Image (cartoon, rainbow, N blue to C red):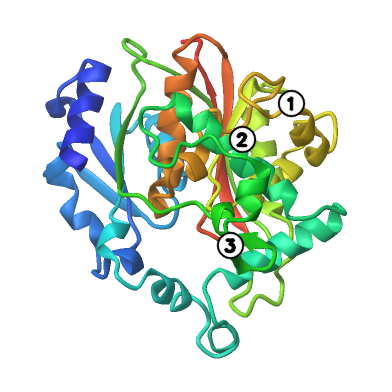
């Protein structure tokens, strides 16, 4: 998977693997079941005997590391690689639960979606809404995915059908949760704009409230998103962007990130209900279909969003994009990148 992705990336960039100066891999040992997962990636992406490093958690964080390496002048061409094979994980729920504190959190959880449900519940209470708001996100993203040949979960559905898809953990329905998918991506960051498809205008990373026992967690909110977006937009010199791509393992994830970004001139729920966030709206969110429409590739979700952002910018329909991705399913930390299609 990685070799094919890297081959396509080199062809798209008009360079060979020999011109690669370094590789930044995104990997998560817990999902892989082995340590030092990046020891398997350099050969596949042309990085043998060259600079290599591994960045854990979401791959948008690895992307930012690659940007800094190029900006420092140390390296000219850097490959960011990420892959996920959840089809190899037989006990995904147990793996997620084992990431949590073994004394104060794990014994209390009967199911790995419970923490996400608490976030969703808190968000809906704060906005005086019900689960149909989450269903509207699912409907929007699945229909957007119908335009995307890479989407595994594209469908035309209705709010009523989503609401009837079955309860998982109140208020989460089955279709509010992105289905898992296998995925690999390779993205080349270069100081040479010769064959550039997009330009990185700014980036930011931030933490919100975090503690291993979740005592500092602010339920229903992603505090990292506002701080990271502020850094990225300040670097870019832009006050607004044309669309956003947001990794959303759950429907409410998209809403929680949007709530903190501050890019809308009206409440998020009103923008969603009016169609403002749809493909043809004033501020499209996840026109690619997002993780709900494409499939959730675990730690590779951030790079999935970058690839889709660049593809959408290349259509000429939009000029600028904000790409955001949390570090996992419930952690209050994540990254934001601002991209421009004008090279």
Task: Determine which of the numbered discs, if any, sits on residue 276 in the image.
Answer: 1
Q: Earlier in the sequence, mark 1 or mark 2?
A: 2
Q: Residue 32's image quarter?
A: bottom left
Q: Circle 1 — which element? A: loop
Residue drawn at the location 32% of the way across and 58% of the way down: 86
The answer to whether residue 315 is seen in the rendering is: yes
Label 2 neighbour load within 10 Å: few <14, some 14-19, many 20+: many
Q: Residue 9's image quarter?
A: top left
Q: Position of residue 202 (x, y in %)?
A: 56, 29
The answer to whether residue 203 is seen in the rendering is: no
Label 3 neighbour load within 10 Å: few <14, some 14-19, many 20+: few
Task: Determine which of the numbered discs, if any, sits on residue 140 in the image.
Answer: 2
Which of labels 1 and 2 is toward the front? 2
Residue drawn at the location 61% of the way across and 48% of the way down: 161
Residue designated by label 3: 166
Q: Earlier in the sequence, mark 1 or mark 3?
A: 3
Q: Position of residue 318 (x, y in %)?
A: 57, 14
Q: Circle 3 — which element? A: loop
């Amino acid at each position: 998977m990685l070799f094919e992705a890297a081959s396509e990336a080199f062809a798209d960039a008009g360079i060979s693997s020999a011109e690669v100066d370094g590789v930044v891999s995104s990997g998560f040992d817990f999902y892989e079941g082995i340590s030092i997962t990046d020891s398997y990636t350099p050969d596949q992406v042309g990085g043998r005997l060259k600079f290599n490093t591994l960045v854990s958690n979401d791959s948008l964080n690895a992307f930012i590391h690659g940007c800094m390496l190029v900006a420092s002048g140390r390296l000219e061409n850097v490959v960011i690689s990420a892959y996920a094979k959840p089809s190899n994980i037989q006990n995904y729920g147990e793996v997620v639960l084992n990431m949590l504190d073994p004394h104060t959190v794990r014994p209390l959880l009967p199911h790995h979606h419970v923490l996400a449900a608490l976030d969703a519940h808190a968000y809906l209470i704060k906005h005086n809404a019900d689960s149909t708001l989450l269903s509207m996100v699912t409907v929007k993203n699945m229909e957007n995915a119908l335009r995307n040949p890479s989407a595994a979960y594209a469908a035309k559905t209705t709010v009523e059908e989503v609401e009837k898809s079955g309860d998982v953990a109140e208020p989460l329905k089955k279709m509010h949760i992105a289905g898992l998918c296998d995925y690999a991506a390779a993205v080349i960051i270069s100081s040479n704009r010769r064959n550039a498809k997009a330009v990185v205008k700014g980036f930011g990373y931030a933490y919100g409230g975090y503690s291993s026992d979740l005592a500092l967690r602010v339920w229903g909110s992603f505090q990292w998103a506002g701080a990271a977006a502020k850094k990225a937009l300040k670097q870019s010199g832009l006050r607004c962007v044309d669309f956003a791509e947001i990794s959303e393992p759950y429907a409410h994830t998209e809403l929680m990130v949007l709530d903190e970004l501050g890019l809308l001139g009206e409440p998020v729920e009103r923008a969603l209900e009016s169609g403002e966030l749809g493909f043809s709206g004033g501020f499209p969110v996840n026109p690619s279909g997002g993780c709900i429409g494409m499939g959730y590739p675990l730690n590779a979700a951030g790079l999935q969003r970058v690839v889709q952002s660049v593809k959408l910018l290349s259509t000429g329909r939009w000029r600028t994009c904000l790409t955001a991705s949390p570090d996992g399913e419930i952690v209050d930390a994540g990254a934001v990148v601002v991209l421009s299609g004008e090279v």
